[in-house]
Amino acid sequence: MDIKIDQSSQMSLYEQIAFQIRLLIADGKLKVGDNLPSVRNLSKMLAVSTISVQRAYAELQKDGITKGVEGKGSFVADGVNKSSLKDGLLSQVEETAKQTIQVAKQNGIKLTELQDLIHILWEE
């Protein structure tokens, strides 16, 4: 599972995990019925605590994106609307972008400088 954790992000670890799992589903890389890694395995893969993974999985299950099956693990739930999932993700990105733009404006950073920074970070 292709999830990258940014320890310097303002987003908590569990939020990063849940966000990226949502993105994997929205992009079709995870499909209905696919089994997610166990909490222990994903925490080892990402070098994060099991609590962070448990919290991410709990949030996904609460939102109806995954379902837990006792003794078998977590699976992508039936009826997940990829389009609305993608819209929700874009909404989160838009909120973050608005905050970034506000900080940039308040500190006299020009649009071209911000665009250059975004291009650099995108390529990392």
Image (cartoon, rainbow, N blue to C red):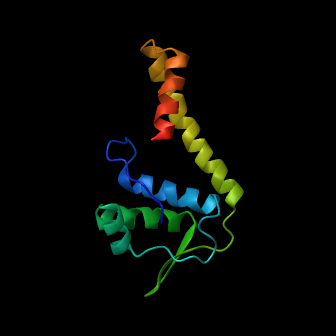
Q: Is residue 100 above or below residue 94?
A: above
Q: Position of residue 61 (x, y in %)?
A: 51, 68
Please state the total of marks drawn on the protein image: 0
Tell me what residue is drawn at x 66 percent, y 48 percent.
Answer: 87
Q: Is residue 93 above or below residue 36?
A: above
Q: Position of residue 27 (x, y in %)?
A: 64, 58
Tell me what residue is drawn at x 32 percent, y 42 percent.
Answer: 8
- The front one of 91 and 112 is 112
**Among all residues in the image, which is located at the extreme bottom?**
71
Instruction: Give the left or right position of residue 121, taking residue 64 as reference.
Output: left
Tell me what residue is drawn at x 51 percent, y 25 percent.
Answer: 116
Q: Position of residue 79 (x, y in %)?
A: 69, 70
Instruction: Give the left or right position of residue 10, taking residue 26 as reference.
Output: left
Task: Name the image quarter holding residue 63.
Answer: bottom right
Q: Position of residue 64 (x, y in %)?
A: 58, 67
Task: Name the image quarter holding residue 82.
Answer: bottom right
Task: Name the image quarter holding residue 54.
Answer: bottom left
**Among all residues in the image, which is located at the extreme top?**
108
Q: Is residue 80 above or below residue 6?
A: below
Work out which quarter of the rendered image holds the C terminus and state it: top left
- The front one of 106 and 8 is 8
Q: Is residue 70 above or below residue 7?
A: below
